[in-house]
Amino acid sequence: MSAHKKKPVPLAVGRSTAQESSSHGSIQISDDSQSVTLSLVSGASAKVLLYGATVVSWKIQERELLWLSEASALDGSKAVRGGIPLVFPVFGPPPAGTAVEKLAQHGFARTSKWNLLGRVEEETEGDKGVRVDFGLSSDSLDDETKAKWPYEFGLIYSVTLRESTLETKMVVQNPGSAAFEFNVLFHTYLRIPDVSTIGVQGLNSLTYRDKTLGGTEHQESSDVIKIASQTDRVYKSAPDAITVLEDDKPLYTVTKTGLNDVVLWNPYSDGAEKIGDWEPKEGYKNMVCVEAGSVADWQTLEQESTWEGGVTHKAHL
Ligand SMILES: O=P(O)(O)OC[C@H]1O[C@@H](O)[C@H](O)[C@@H](O)[C@@H]1O
């Protein structure tokens, strides 16, 4: 995803506070070692919890670009309601009779404590950024989760902050002796000024599974999709770039690499009422989830193989 990379520099994770700075940005570990904040001198910042490796904030010039519920737990007791939760190894309710059937909805990546692996300064065609890598492996899973999904795996999740983009990339490794199947998804809650003024472009003519209509399949016929009721769709084999428009102007572009599908989700007023950690209830007006992933079909990872995919979120401010 980036043309030029430097080797990771280990962060002083053991210290109560640690800051690494360069001429264009800095990375700071919080006093309680539970989160990492990336900042650029240009005014962009991002905050990532070690719990779930969940990005909970992405700002440009003090403008927050991700939606986060005011009632979300941020203490590791429950998956974060907002930001960018990571979905792995299953998307949605685990299907009975599959290897993931004992896991919770959306899997364990978003509810596990990840390790901070290191930091890298990046430069792609003059666009400087700061990057943090997080890791989660079968060795670091709690025993209960390991028993529910007994495969050997390694995940490396990288978050790169640039002046107008936030890049997220996942590497899945299978160092074990058995192949496994997985779903993966970047569950991004984009903050928007008003759901009635936005539209989602790039999904026209695709087949989608509509979870609000019992999982039936339909074909999209809108060039710009408007959200005026509960929306929960899996668009299959989607193009790599999806644009969120505000009125007719691009607000965000979500560009995926190595991922097949796009999920469009907004619980709307009726759905938000039923979600306990959703506050304010009217918050559905200020968010849309455009979630890139590989979820319509299982990805198979053979032993000693590696899979890679990622998403770049660009804000047009
Ligand atoms: O409440 P959760 O587990 O965070 O899931 C939120 C939503 O996540 C979306 O990705 C799913 O398509 C929805 O069906 C689901 O309701």
Image (spheres, rainbow, N blue to C red):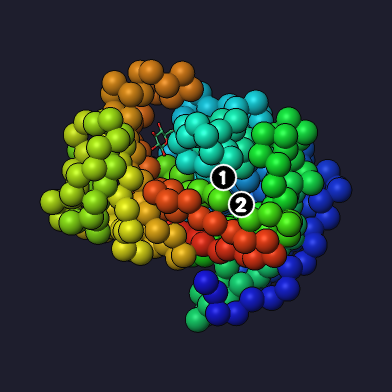
Q: How many marks?
A: 2
Ranked by sequence position, the earlier of labels 1 and 2 is: 1
State whether residue 270 is above or below residue 24: above
Check disc 2 and give the amino acid type. Phe
**Residue 137, horizontal then vertical, whole percent:** 73, 49
**Residue 123, horizontal then vertical, whole percent:** 58, 76
Q: Is residue 298 visible from the viewing direction of this image?
A: yes
Image quarter for ligand 1 equals top left
Q: Residues within 10 Å of mark 1 (few under 14, many from 20)?
A: many
Tell me what residue is drawn at x 51 percent, y 55 percent. Answer: 299
**Marks 1/2: CA distance?**
10 Å
Tell me what residue is drawn at x 25 percent, y 37 percent. Answer: 216
Kindly indicate whether the residue at mark 2 contacts the one at mark 1 (C-beta within 8 angstroms).
Answer: yes
Residue at the extreme right of the image, as rendered: 14
Q: For residue 180, which numbered disc appears in the image?
A: 2
Between disc 1 and disc 2, the foreground one is 2
Q: For residue 89, which numbered disc appears in the image?
A: 1
- Front residue of 178 and 2: 178
Q: For residue 260, which numbered disc appears in the image?
A: none
Instruction: Check disc 1 and report its element: helix, strand or loop.
Output: loop
Tell me what residue is drawn at x 59 percent, y 59 percent. Answer: 301
Check disc 1 and give the amino acid type. Pro
State whether residue 159 is above or below residue 141: below
Instruction: Check disc 2 and report its element: helix, strand or loop.
Output: strand
